[in-house]
């Protein structure tokens, strides 16, 4: 019994050669036909690489926020329905911070935060920057290091000392390449001494430059700069990643109680969980990646239709050849296989060229942007798999048409 | 060898339906062709010769009656079974050669072996194709493409291709129709030689001169057999060539 599979196995090898030769004969046309697939695959590979790179870069930024970080923001102040932004309301006080420290045992480090913008003047240079009031534990919470000098101490916090550590960008603007440690800087006409230089952290979440800032004791900021007794936010480090949710619930309960909120009231603060942010961000970038992939997959379908078109033309052009093959005893399965292999070869070669082009395109994107696209093996495998499937799918109809030709009519075809 | 005729036609009919018009191309042909015969079909244009040959060659299915090849009926066979039969048992030679262009003589001859079941190995294909080309006198031309060969040479390549799977039946529809008379006689000499080695040959011609080389002449008219005559003394094509050589020793051989 001759089954189609039998014929397939026995003759696919020989048929492959026939198909390859037919493609070589029409080299230019083969290349043009494969162009659709080449562009489609290149688009998929490059887009997915860009998506991966963006995701990795954002994830890195999120984890750069610090490990096991919880941030409690004062709620947003509303006036006439317009929100003034996170931390603008006056709800969180130092007493709240003390209470959290006392009652929430999983909290291992705390930094109350006040933040304002101000002109910093040094050496007759003038630079507008962010002034952040923090505690000495801030660097531990944010996993941030100093390249020179040291952080202010608890004692300096207690005495509201006029000391500051400086971000690398701010240092560059105010002091150029000189060592800023030991230099003086005036903020709102108050003289500060710079005691430490922060290592560079690059752009943070939301794009603001984390290196452009001066960090001073929160007491100093409250007393001497803002005159405000309310905090913008509190940065908290939790002992263990597994305790984040529990700690968050405890803090919520504690603050609601302290702020005398009843069951009907909504929170007058917001707690951000670094893990939540990371998950949200990665799910968003995942969707973006999927969209990019889907859009570029469309071009693969267009490429597939191009292959089908050329295969149909090819079947018509080679009617006589097909007639001869059938007349000398080629079984329909062998003819079908020949044209199917031609289509698959076209799309696989297109896929190969597309992968190379996609990698080059990803490199180019990397060269002109501030993140590195990541070409993954699975996207390459996927691109090949999809090109193979396209070859089969769009090659099948022309192949079947070829195999169904009537040999007598085919031989008469001019 | 069995005693059943190689070909048995029983009330074989073929009608073509084109729109409202029904053409009875073959109407009720009944005849036997034994192994080793060398038969010529003759008849005016449109008398159904090609239709009959295509049916004999399993390129087409009859619409009525039955065709038994080697005792096995053809009715109800599917395209794949017919393809296997064509590949194994039948060699077909066409008036217009039907070689693959841009493909060497050798590869043209290898073609039927590509589709043989079970598979024939590459070295064996090559060796058999070379032998077949040698048999038709084209050993030196195996790398030539059809466009580099004369009509007679192209038809020889086609004959080599028809022979390469060692068929029992060689069918030829006006094989000399596109050739000059001298080349035609050479092709007939080749056929006579093949027939002498045991292969059954059925051909179509409308030239009495050519039919004279065959052992049996069947004349068709309007799709039916008009006459069926045994030719006791077929002419020898080889002798004819010698005679022509003697007449015009300077004539170029193709
Ligand atoms: N595919 C076809 N469709 C319709 N009519 C056909 C077809 N092939 C052949 N015929 C008709 O069948 C008759 C016999 O044709 P054919 O067998 O080619 O004759 P011959 O080879 O003797 O010249 C002719 O009348 C021809 O017009
Ligand atoms: Mg005819």
Image (spheres, coloured by chain):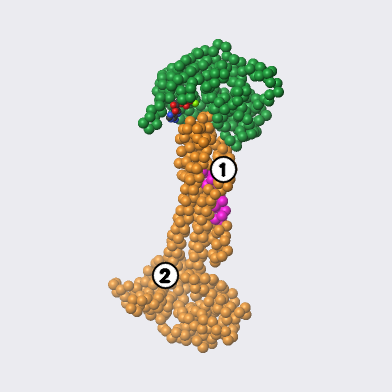
Q: Position of residue A210 (x, y in %)?
A: 51, 74
Choose between A215 and B152: the one closer to the eye.
B152
Residue in the image at 56% along x and 40% along y: A22
Q: Position of residue A73 (x, y in %)?
A: 41, 74
Q: Is residue A278 left or right of residue A13?
A: left
Q: Is residue A192 left or right of residue A280?
A: right
Q: Report the number of discs.
A: 2
Residue in the image at 55% along x and 36% along y: A15
Chain rendered orange: A
Q: Is residue A296 left or right of residue A257?
A: right
Choose between A373 and B229: the one closer to the eye.
B229
Quarter holding residue A165: bottom right
Rendered position, A307 above or below A196: above
Residue at the extreme right: B250
Chain letter of the residue carrying label 1: A
Q: Which mark is residue A23?
A: 1
Rendered position, B104 above or below B54: below
Q: Position of residue A101 (x, y in %)?
A: 42, 75
Q: Which mark is residue A272?
A: 2
Rendered position, A343 above or below A180: above
Marks 2 and 1 on same chain: yes
- CB atoms at circles 2 and 1 under 8 Å apart? no
- Dot 2 lies on which element? strand
Q: Which of the two labelled residues, at mark 2 and mark 1, occupies the earlier sequence position?
A: 1
Range drawn in magenta: A343-359
Chain letter of the residue carrying label 2: A
Kindly report which numbered mark, 2 or 1, lies closer to the viewer in this rendering. Answer: 1
Chain rendered green: B
Could you tell me how far apart the alpha carbons at marks 2 and 1 are, in whole angstroms? Answer: 60 Å
């Amino acid at each position: 019994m001759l089954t189609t599979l039998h014929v397939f196995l026995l003759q696919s090898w020989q048929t492959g050669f026939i198909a390859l030769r037919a493609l070589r004969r029409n080299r230019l046309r083969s290349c043009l036909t494969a162009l659709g697939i080449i562009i489609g695959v290149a688009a998929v590979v490059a887009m997915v690489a860009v998506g991966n790179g963006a995701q990795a870069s954002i994830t890195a930024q999120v984890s750069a926020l610090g490990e096991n970080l919880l941030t409690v923001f004062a709620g947003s102040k509303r006036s006439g329905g317009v929100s003034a932004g996170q931390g603008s309301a006056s709800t969180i006080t130092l007493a709240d911070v003390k209470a959290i420290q006392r009652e929430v045992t999983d909290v291992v480090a705390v930094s109350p935060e006040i933040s304002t913008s101000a002109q910093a003047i040094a050496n007759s240079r003038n630079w507008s920057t962010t002034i952040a009031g923090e505690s000495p534990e801030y660097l531990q919470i944010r996993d941030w290091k100093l390249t020179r000098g040291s952080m202010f101490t608890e004692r300096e916090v207690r005495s509201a000392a006029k000391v500051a550590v400086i971000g690398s960008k701010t240092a560059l603007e105010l002091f150029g390449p000189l060592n800023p440690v030991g230099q003086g800087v005036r903020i709102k006409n108050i003289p500060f001494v710079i005691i430490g230089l922060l290592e560079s952290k690059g752009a943070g979440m939301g794009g603001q430059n984390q290196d452009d800032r001066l960090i001073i004791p929160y007491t100093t900021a409250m007393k001497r700069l803002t005159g405000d007794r309310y905090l913008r936010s509190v940065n908290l480090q939790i002992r263990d990643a597994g305790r984040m949710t529990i700690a968050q619930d405890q803090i919520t309960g504690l603050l609601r109680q302290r702020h005398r909120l009843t069951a009907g009231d909504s929170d007058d603060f917001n707690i951000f969980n670094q893990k939540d942010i990371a998950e949200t961000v990665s799910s968003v970038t995942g969707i973006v990646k999927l969209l990019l992939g889907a859009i570029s997959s469309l071009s693969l379908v267009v490429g597939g239709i191009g292959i089908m078109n050329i295969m149909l033309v090819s079947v018509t052009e080679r009617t006589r050849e097909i007639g001869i093959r059938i007349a000398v005893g080629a079984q329909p399965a062998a003819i079908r296989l020949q044209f199917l292999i031609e289509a698959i070869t076209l799309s696989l070669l297109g896929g190969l060229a597309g992968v190379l082009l996609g990698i080059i395109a990803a490199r180019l994107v990397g060269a002109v942007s501030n993140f590195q696209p990541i070409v993954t093996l699975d996207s390459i495998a996927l691109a090949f798999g999809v090109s193979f499937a396209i070859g089969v799918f769009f090659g099948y109809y022309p192949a079947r048409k070829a195999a169904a030709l009537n040999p007598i009519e085919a031989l008469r075809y001019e | 060898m069995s005693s059943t005729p190689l070909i048995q036609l029983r009330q074989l009919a073929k009608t073509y339906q084109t729109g409202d018009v029904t053409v009875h191309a073959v109407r009720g042909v009944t005849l036997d062709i034994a192994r080793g015969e060398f038969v010529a079909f003759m008849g005016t244009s449109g008398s159904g010769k090609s239709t009959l040959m295509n049916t004999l060659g399993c390129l087409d299915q009859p619409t009525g009656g039955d065709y038994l090849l080697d005792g096995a009926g053809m009715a109800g066979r599917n395209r794949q079974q017919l393809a296997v039969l064509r590949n194994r048992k039948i060699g077909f030679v066409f008036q217009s050669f039907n070689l693959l262009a841009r493909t060497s003589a050798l590869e043209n001859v290898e073609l039927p072996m590509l589709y043989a079941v079970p598979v024939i190995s590459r070295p064996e294909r090559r060796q058999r194709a070379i032998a077949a080309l040698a048999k038709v006198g084209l050993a030196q031309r195996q790398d030539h493409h059809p466009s580099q060969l004369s009509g007679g040479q192209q038809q020889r390549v086609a004959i080599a291709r028809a022979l390469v799977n060692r068929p029992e039946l060689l069918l030829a529809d006006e094989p000399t129709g596109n050739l000059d008379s001298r080349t035609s006689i050479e092709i007939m000499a080749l056929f006579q030689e093949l027939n002498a080695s045991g292969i059954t040959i059925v051909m179509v011609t409308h030239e009495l001169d050519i039919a004279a080389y065959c052992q049996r002449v069947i004349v068709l008219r309007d799709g039916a057999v008009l006459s069926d005559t045994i030719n006791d003394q077929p002419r020898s094509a080889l002798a004819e060539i010698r005679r022509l050589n003697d007449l015009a020793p300077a004539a170029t051989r193709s």
